[in-house]
Amino acid sequence: MKCYVNLTNGIECIQKLGLRDYRFIRIQSTACEQKRWDFIIQDLDYDFLMSLALGENVVVFDTSKREVSRAVWQGLKWIEYVLNRRWLGRESTAIVRNHNVTSYFRSMYKELENRTFKKIDYFKKFLNIESVDIGYVCMCTDKDGNYSYFKEVLAGRIIKLREVA
């Protein structure tokens, strides 16, 4: 399993869940709110895309004031839709918060820029999957925006890594 901690609030999962082997990704809830769909795909990390293309079991960890963050309930669904369609030629049904948003995603997909398609097309040659399915773990938090807390968690991680080395 490849664990991706969504910046910034997802950092809390490192401590709460005792994550040890993880990477970072930034799927911005604000970009989802602003309907910046091209940006969301364009901003995806290459390691994340390669892991998905190779068929790794990818799980995104995040926290939110609500039960599930917008980056997860909307952003991950958009990413799955785009990658399934572009990589596998399949338009999957997109259900977001019990609403079928497939026609909306279809229209937003048509507006993606050529450079975005070029970025994700690069990974086609490595595909070892039948579908793109991104797992997630999301928890409620009271630490939203508490950057000193996040810094402490990450500083503790560095200290532990130094002790191991």
Image (cartoon, grey):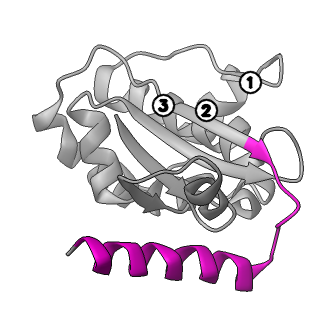
**Quarter of the image that includes the N terminus:** top left
Q: Is residue 142 above or below residue 128?
A: below
Q: Residue furthest front?
A: 163
| Position of residue 157 measured from the top left corner of the image (x, y, whole percent) | 45, 72
Q: In this rendering, which labeled residue sits more in front, label 2 or label 1?
A: 2
In the drawing, does residue 95 fall left or right of residue 17?
right
Q: Nearer the viewer, residue 135 or 151?
A: 151
**Residue 29 numbered tag:** none
Label 1 environment density (alpha carbons within 10 Å; few <14, some 14–19, many ≥20) = some
Q: Earlier in the sequence, mark 2 or mark 1?
A: 2
Q: Indicate the quadrant where residue 129 lies.
A: top left
Which amino acid lies under the numbered mark 2 shown in the image of this protein? Lys
Q: In the rendered structure, which disc, 3 or 2, sits on the residue that comes first in sequence?
A: 2
Cα–Cα span, label 3 and label 2: 8 Å
Range of magenta residues? 139-164
User: Within 10 angstroms of label 2, few (less than 14), some, or many (20 or more) residues?
Assistant: some
Residue linked to disc 1:
101
Q: Which residue is mark 2?
A: 77
The residue at 61%/32% (across/down) is 77
**Mark 3 sits on what residue?**
134
